[in-house]
Structures are given as structure tokens and as C-alpha cells.
Amino acid sequence: MNLKDARSFVARFVKGEYTPEEYATFLRWLQDASIDELGIIADEHEALFEQWSLAAVAPSPEWVGQLEQKLDEQERLAPVKRLNTGRVVRRPMWIAAASVLLAVTGGYLWYNHSIDKQAAVADNPVIALNKVFSVARGGQQQEFTLADGSKIWLNAASTLKYPASFSGSERTVELTGEAYFEVTGSAARPFHVKIKGAEIEVLGTHFNVKAYGEESSSKTTLVDGAVKVIRGTETLQLKPGEQAEIVYPTSGANPPMKLQKGVDIDHVLSWKSGDLEFKDDALSNVMQAISRCYDVEIRYQSGIPEARFTGNFSRQSNIQQILNQLEHQNIHCSLQGKVVTVLR
């Protein structure tokens, strides 16, 4: 993201027209932005904010701390200012920068307000999923650890929302994209992964979830332990080597969840070791994966071919090398800039 992109995001942000992935990218940009860039973004936000209104909440301590440190390093001799939070800051510009952070945090919670309201109605403590870990389109898989010790690997174009700490009787996160989980066991505090239209309940186990918003189905694959995949009144309890698939129809009633046994775990987890492995996959699925991993746009010259593909790509290969492999199976493509056009 550059300054132009950040200004564009702010314009969408104040109207609530943004995605969690865009939000995460903007937060990363804020971390590296210069003082002048922060001022420009603050001015942009203030001008637009006169037309729109968001709830004001305290800025995220993590980002406040990071930007304060940057200000400390750049302007140690500037006059000291205080926010009403009591935090010491080193320059009046911080007031503008903090206003951006305040709005960003407020907008993020507002973006998820329906979930929070539903939880509050149940008279239970509301645990805000106020942290975001994401891997951008074209990015390599990344690993991180939650507060409870659970480890998660995130694939390209994926976002995980989670709380700063787990409290109460449950541990809940929300996933868009693909992730591999190694959950720390706790019978008293089950682990829940929310995906599109469903929820996965875990006690402590290893499993993979693929739930990209643009795909027509999601797949949960169990490596070891036990998980339940819950959608409405439906429940599938998986054993190691089994996979639950949820199909999202474009119209009509939802079909029942599918259970597949004897799944090739190495195939499912190939992305985690830096590969893209396909076995008789529909070309549309292959091209979606390539689009996410190489951050390219896919176009079809004459509709989506019925072709299927079997093969293995290394993420160390460049996009042209990938297209050359497709060519060997009579799948012809052209590359112009960041646009791949499928010719067959």
C-alpha cells in the first residue's frame, strides 16, 4: 500500500465500505508511514469525517505504542503533549495521528457490531476479536502463536481475527482464507473457528481449514485429534484423515455437508511447505490459487474451460514458470503485467 492507496482506503473506511484484509493492510502501512504521511491521512480523514460519523473508542494500545516509539525516535526534542488517556507523546502531530488510529479501531469494531450485539444480548462477556493477523495476496505463508500457545500457519490472501487474550469458558477466532491450526488442548475451554456460515469446535488438535470467500465451498480437514463442524442444526464430527465440505449454492437451500474419508493429508497441506499441489482439480480452482499466490488477475478469453489439472508447483517459481507448466497440459495462457488470460 502507498499513500495514494491509503487515502483511497480512508475514503471507503469512513463509509464502512472496506474488508478485513484492507483494514489489516492499512494498519501495516500506518506502522511504516512517515510523519508527513500520517498528517496527510489525518487531514483526509477529518475532511471526510464531517460527512460521516463513526463511534469513537480508545486506540489500540499496540499501535499507539508503535507510533509513539516512532515519534520518540524522530522528534526527541519537540514539545511534549498529553492525550486525555494520560499517554505522553512528543508532538502535536500525534493528535492527528491518534485520531486516525481512534477512527480505525472504532470503525473496525463498528464493522463487526452485529456480532458483538448478538453476544451482548446473551448476557455473556463480549470478547472483541480486535486483533488481525493476515497474509496479503502474493505473500508467503506465515506462522504465529496465539495467547494460549496455539500455533497457526496462514496461507496467502488469508485473514484471522482474534482477541488480545482469551478469557471465559471459550476461545474464539474468525478465519477468512486458509489456515493450519495446532490448538493447545483444554477440555474446559473449547476452541472455536468461525468461517463463512459455520463454526468449527475443537478441544485440542491439528487441522486445516480452507474457507476463501470467493470459493463455492469450504473444507475442514482433520490431521489428528477430533473436531466438530457445525452449520445450523447440522454437525459433522471428524476423525483423523476425514474432511468436511460445505457447499455454498448461489441460490436455493444449502445442501447437506459432505464427509470425505481417507483424505490425502500431504496433498491438503502442500501449501504449508511452499507448494501448490493439484490432483484432477477444476481449472477454475487452479487459477484461483495462482491468483492468490502470485497476486495476479485471472481472465478467460471464452468462458471458463472444463479442463482439469494435475501437477505440483513450487512457490519459489515465478508466474511465467507456472504458466509454462500449464502449457505442457494444453492449458494456454498469456501474461500482460499482472493479468493472466486463459486462452483455452
Image: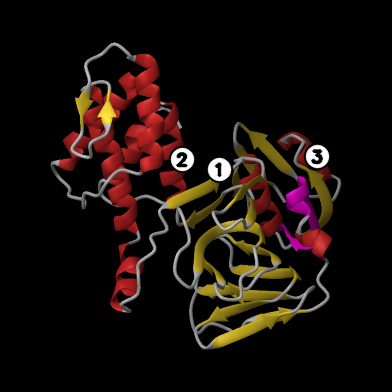
Q: Marks 1 and 2: in contact by CB < 8 Å?
A: yes
Picture residue at 82% right of the left edge, 43% below the top: 325
The kind of residue on which mark 2 rests is Thr
Q: Secondary structure at mark 1?
A: loop
The answer to whether 93 is drawn above or below residue 103 in the figure is: above
Q: Please check the rendered image and state whether residue 276 is part of the magenta-colored stretch, yes or no.
A: yes
User: Which is more foreground, mark 1 or mark 3?
Assistant: 1
Q: Secondary structure at mark 2?
A: helix
Q: CA distance from mark 3 to mark 2?
A: 31 Å
Residue 221: horizontal and vertical position, in percent? Answer: 71, 69
Q: Hey, what amino acid is under mark 1? A: Ala
> Mark 1 near mark 3, Cβ–Cβ under 8 Å?
no
Mark 1 is surrounded, within 10 Å at the Cα level, by few (under 14), some (14 to 19) or many (20 or more) other residues, namely some
Report the amino acid beneath label 3.
Answer: Asn
In the picture of the structure, the residue carrying the numbered disc 1 is: 136
Quick one: label 3, few (<14), some, or many (20+) residues within 10 Å?
some
Query: In terms of depth relative to the viewer, which is nearer, 277 or 113?
Result: 113
Left or right of residue 51: residue 40: right
Rendered residue at 60%/77% (across/down): 229
Label whose residue precedes the other's in the sequence (2 or 1): 2
User: Which residues fall within the magenta stretch?
Assistant: 270-283
**Residue 289, percent across and down?**
67, 52
- Residue 45, image x, y percentages: 23, 36
At x 39%, y 23%, the residue is 70
Residue on which the image places disc 3: 324
Work out whether mark 1 precedes mark 3 in sequence or the reverse, and give the earlier one: 1
Residue with the mark numbered 2: 25
